Image: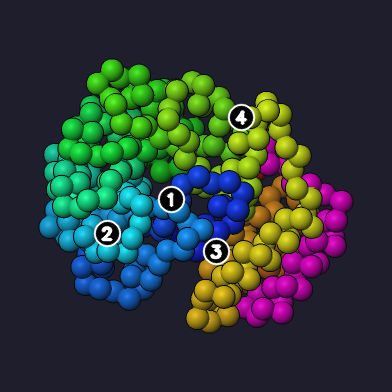
Amino acid sequence: MEDVTYKSFRYMCKKYGADVMYTEFVSADALVRNIEKTMRKMTLFEFDRPVAIQIYGNKVDAMVEAARVVEEAGPDFIDINFGCPMKKIVKKGNGAALLRDIPKMVEIAGAVAKAVKLPVTAKTRLGWEATDKPIVEVAERLQDAGIAALAVHGRTRCQIYSGNADWSLIGEIKKNPRMHIPIIGNGDINGPLKAKAFYDQTGVDALMIGRGAIGRPWIFKEVKHYFETGEELQAPTVPEIVENVKEQFRLSLEWKDKELNAIREMRRHFAKYFPTLPHFRELRVKLLRAEELRDVLMFLDEIAETYADYRVDYTNASLR
């Protein structure tokens, strides 16, 4: 996820048990042009592994060249984004836009898979809109093109993130006797109960958690514990959450060139770390507007002190 799965957040997810990591997606065109900001997104650390660098684009030649550049960066596999629904991506024919041009999607997948030695995986959605959900056929065609594993988000592009993810078609892909590559289910996993329900419903090979981990990187620990024991872990206290936020923030400060850049990088996470707290709006606004390190730390300490006896109720927290 762009501006989300950067280094400090990946570290926190790995700390709490995420098995496989993905970088922020990177533009094939930008890689071909050697854009410095894009190249920095491919910086990997040993804690990441196994890790994928995810690329997106709609030109076969550019995607092939970008994949070769990515291979040199040393990930464990390369992932192709055929699913991003955001307007700025789709309007240029990238991401989920390729769900309207399946032949080109398959051509890109095949060309990239042939161009590199690393495994190539892909992520996509059910289809473009409610009346167009070709994912079962698309999955077969991507497999035949050389894709080594497929992650599917249970919504169409037109849904963006509205409504509920539909896992029934993900289950159909997995139960299709022609499919032999791993199928990864994604969408609306906001805790261990849903993770188990979706897994049991579909029999997928793995679960992918995206938005559900923002502000809650320990969700991976919670899910694993529930799968192993059938019991839910108690939610962390607000002071415990604050310590996690500080740890992630310190890592961002170490890895960014300027203090303010680290603060801005963290704001999306600040906004998600404390859902469902009563009368929290004023402190939340202060935290999100802070532009100096001392102020960020001061507001975090104030949150910890004000809500010292609270645990966050994630059952009522929104993924939006």
**Mark 1 = which residue?**
50
Q: What residue type is disc 4 on?
A: Phe
Give the mark nearer the N terminus: 1 vs 3.
Answer: 3
Crowding at mark 3 (Cα within 10 Å: few <14, some 14-19, many 20+): many
> Is residue 20 shown to the viewer in this render?
yes
- Which mark lies nearer to you, 2 or 3? 2
Crowding at mark 2 (Cα within 10 Å: few <14, some 14-19, many 20+): some
**Mark 4 = which residue?**
227
Q: What residue type is disc 3 on?
A: Ser
**Mark 3 = which residue?**
8
The numbered mark at residue 71 is: 2
What's the CA distance linking mark 1 and mark 3?
16 Å
Q: Looking at the picture, how far across and down is residue 177, in whole percent?
A: 28, 17
Q: Looking at the picture, how far across and down is residue 311, in whole percent?
A: 79, 47
x 54%, y 46%: residue? 18
The local secondary structure at tag 3 comes to helix
**Magenta extent:** 290-315
> Is residue 282 shown to the viewer in this render?
no
- Determine the image quadrant of residue 44: bottom left
- Say if the magenta span includes residue 313: yes
What's the CA distance linking mark 1 and mark 4?
21 Å
Give the mark nearer the N terminus: 2 vs 3.
Answer: 3
Looking at this view, is 132 or 139 the one in front?
Answer: 139
Q: Are marks 3 and 4 in contact (CB under 8 Å)?
A: no
